[in-house]
Image (cartoon, rainbow, N blue to C red):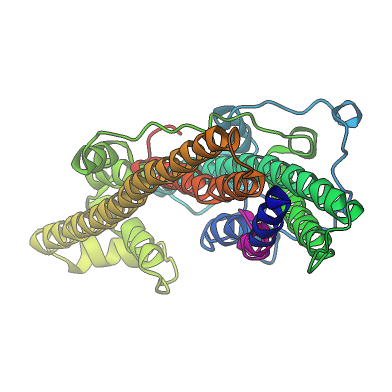
Amino acid sequence: MVWSQTWIKNNLRFCEVLRVALAFGLFVSFVDSHIGFSQSTQQSHPSPSKPTQNVFLVSTSVPYRFPPKSSESQPNPSTLSAAQIGQLASERSGAAKSLSSDSRSRSLQSQSLCNDSDSEKEIVGTFQAAVAYRLRQTASANAMKLHYGIAACLTAERTLNETATLLDEQDKAQSLLVEKGIPIPDPHLVGRLKISLEDKRLENYSKMAILRSQLSALIGTENACGHAPLENQEIIPSDRDVCEHITQATACRCDLRTMNRLRGTINADTLAVWDRMGAKLSGVPSLAKSKAFWPRMLFGRSTREEIECAVIARRNWIDELVAEQTRQIALEVDVAFEKKKTAALRWVKANEQIDNWENRIKQLEMLGEVQGNIASQFEANLNRRQAEGPRIERWLEWHLANIDLMLAVGCDL
């Protein structure tokens, strides 16, 4: 009888803990806020009216189907790695293909059909090649972010399943108490908690479906629909200094390399071309081209000293452009590096919290051999599952920051 009173007391305590613990929502809301955060990224298959549409805003009308309970009914999942996903997205980047196609079209046009000079074709073509390369890198980064988002959702699904198992065990224990005539203050509490848990499961599964739909726009439906990434849940914090990444970015970024390379093309013959390019890069309207205007200005009215001054001014302009872009790149690298470092440190803390709960579970199991504390063990196991949520969040934060860092550095992803 003493044991029964202790059990009832612990059972009521456990039910109160469940009421609060199921409200934490595990990982679902985190996926929504972090995978959808990048509002400036570009979709690789832009619509004609919106050439820079956001890849994370792709709408989906995929009908909902609850994930099968049995593994035999599921199709064989794709086990493509993050690098393979990124490579596919790079190769299929619609925006990059469109830009490259335009560049090839310009190069094939005869002089009679195109008023562009050879120097202008070379300068514009070089810029287009750099932009296309950057678009491929962006598409690759977006696809890898979606890949890790799906992996995190799958991990959260496993945690939800473990929590559901704990609730089933509590439900069975409660049913035994009812059969023995022991009153339960709220016999329907576990049932309500199960409904809340299933609601979170539905939300998590919906997010996975949306992420796969967005991924299909980058790598194709045949690769994305069944994509179930197998990723190691451990991370290896980087021990490199942020200055090393900034130095590497200065050497790798295609925009900097292109501008430094094209600086040598600024001369008296290409001033007109660079005036139009400068207008485009600065976002201001450019003057209409005239075949007779610039030769008359440069060779009819301008002295050699004036021409040299114009060339020097244009080179100074591109030097300032390179310097400003270098500062912007350094900021991007610094921010991504800080996010990655912080995520790694917080991931370590989340693991320490899990270890603490596992030690508590072992302690309660040892005490359970001499006294009844099953409810306390349930409580500790539930808190152990709850602690998985922050760990998954930090894991995804680290991978997203790592991808942003790689994109900011600009070397091959």
Up the image or down, 105 lies above or below 334; here it is above
Q: Position of residue 405 (x, y in %)?
A: 38, 44
Which of 70/172 is in front?
172
Residue 325 appears at what percent x and percent y? 28, 55
**Residue 291: image location, x then y, percent:** 41, 61
What residue occupies the far left of the structure in this picture? 305
Which stretch is magenta? Answer: 14-28
Identify the image quadrant of residue 22. bottom right
Magenta stretch: includes residue 18 = yes
Residues 115 and 164: in front is 164
Relative to 79, is 15 above or below? below
- Vertical order, 74 against 246 (above or below): above
- Between residues 155 and 401, which one lies in front from this camera angle? 155
One can see residue 63 in this view: no
What residue appears at the point 54 percent right and 63 percent down from the top-left corner?
39
Task: Please give the name of the residue rendered at 33% of the width and 43% of the height, measured from the top-left corner.
Answer: 258
Asked if 387 appears above or below 196 in the picture, the reply is above
The secondary structure making up most of the magenta span is: helix
